[in-house]
Image (spheres, rainbow, N blue to C red):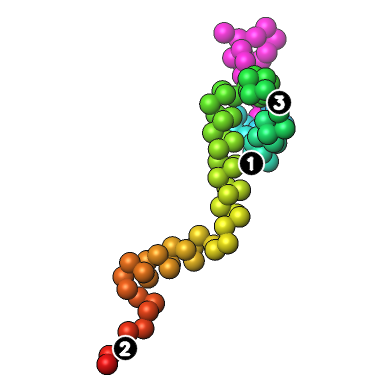
Amino acid sequence: MTVPGGAGFPEGARRATGGEPGRNDRGRFSSRRKMEAVLRLLRGEALDAVSRELGVTAGTLSGWGEAFLAGGQTSLKSRPADEQCCHAMEDARGCGRRRSKR
């Protein structure tokens, strides 16, 4: 279906230049926009209200929140992930420890 006077664009279609701020032309949200949505939830706004306003499912919004919190948890670890990985691999192979040949 086309909108009268809509130059042949399907109903509900968005132009690349006229979409919602923070979304690209394919309807994807920027990381900054996702973070802002998650922070709204953490401040106490209702999940259904935020998801309805942004036009995303509650499940999608919840997923953003879980990813955001997991990223925060990772950044608080005392050892960088790469360093942890290397030490775990060394321990598994027995490397990193000097053995005396006595």
Residue 25 visible in image:
yes
For the point 58% across and 62% down, the residue is 78
Q: Amino acid at mark 3?
A: Glu
Please, which residue is most extreme toward the front here?
Answer: 102
Q: Is residue 95 left or right of residue 50?
A: left
**Disc 2 or 3, which lies upstream in sequence?**
3
The residue carrying mark 3 is 45
Q: Secondary structure at mark 3?
A: loop
Residue wearing tag 1: 31
Cα separation between marks 2 and 3:
62 Å
Circle 3/circle 1 CB separation < 8 Å: no
- Give amino acid for label 1: Ser
User: Is 58 rendered above or below residue 33?
Assistant: above
Q: Quadrant of residue 39?
A: top right
**Where residue 68 appears, x then y in whole percent?**
60, 42
Q: How many C-alpha atoms fall within 10 Å of the one at disc 3: few (<14), some, or many (≥20)?
A: few
Q: Residue 37 at x, y = what percent? A: 67, 32
Residue type pointed to by label 2 = Ser
Which is closer to the viewer, label 1 or label 2? 2
Query: Main SS of the magenta segment?
Result: loop
Distance from the alpha carbon under mark 3 to that under mark 1: 19 Å
The residue positioned 27% from the left and 92% from the top of the image is 102
Which residues, given as a range, are shown in magenta? 1-16
Q: Residue at x 68, y 34 (%)?
A: 42
Residue placed under numbered mark 2 in the picture: 100
